[in-house]
Image: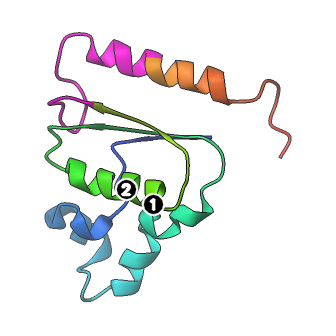
Amino acid sequence: MGIAVVPKPQPHLYNAWFQEIYMNTPEVNPEGYVESAPINFAEGLEGNLLIITGTGETNTHVQIVEGLVDRLIEIGKQFDYIAYPNRNHGLGEGKGTQLHLRVYMARYLLNNLPPGPCLD
């Protein structure tokens, strides 16, 4: 079970000025960009996944997230997805957004985590 809030499933499309601080450029580090891109491992998804983003995102543009959404649909993986309208990277805009977000995630956890301790 996982919750991905404003994920970066395609790092080569993320803001270059930030991404390149840690990974250099895709031309210099092509293997790093492939290995760090969750979209490339979508087939291995097991369990429940909630993806959350904002449609006004200026760092991780909604198209980056929707690339993963589209890939999961293509390969028949089930997941949950919510996009907050006109919210940016911190999902802080809009009256009630923070409370809604936290309650939504808490409800997702309660509905999708098995009861009891983790024994792994």
| Picture quadrant of residue 115 | top right
Q: Is residue 75 shown left or right of residue 86?
A: right
Residue 98 position by quadrant: top left
Which residue is at a point 17% across and 35% down the rendered structure image?
88
Q: CA distance from mark 1 to mark 2?
A: 6 Å
What is the x, y in percent for residue 104? Answer: 45, 20
In percent of width and height, residue 94 lies at 17, 17
**Label 2 element class:** helix
Which residue is pictured at 23% across the width and 80% down the height? 25
Q: Which residues are magenta?
A: 84-103
Residue at horizontal 43%, vertical 64%?
Answer: 39
| Rendered view: 90 above or below 107 | below
Depicted 104 relative to depicted 89: above or below: above
* Kind of residue at disc 1: Glu
> As drawn, is 120 to the left or to the right of 37?
right
Q: In the rendered structure, which amino acid carries the disc numbered 2?
A: Asp
Is 69 placed left or right of 116 in the picture? left
Residue for badge 2: 70
Residue 102 spot, x, y in % from top left: 42, 19
Asked if the residue under mark 2 is in contact with the one under mark 1, i.e. CB atoms within 8 Å, the reply is: yes
The chief SS type of the magenta part is loop
Q: Is residue 60 visible?
A: no
Callout 1: helix, strand or loop? helix
In screen coordinates, is 94 left or right of 109?
left
Asked if the stretch drawn in magenta spans residue 99, the answer is yes
Q: Is residue 17 above or below residue 91?
A: below
Residue 69 position, x and y percent, is: 39, 51
For residue 82, the mark is none
Q: Which residue is mark 1?
A: 74
Does the stretch in magenta take in 110?
A: no
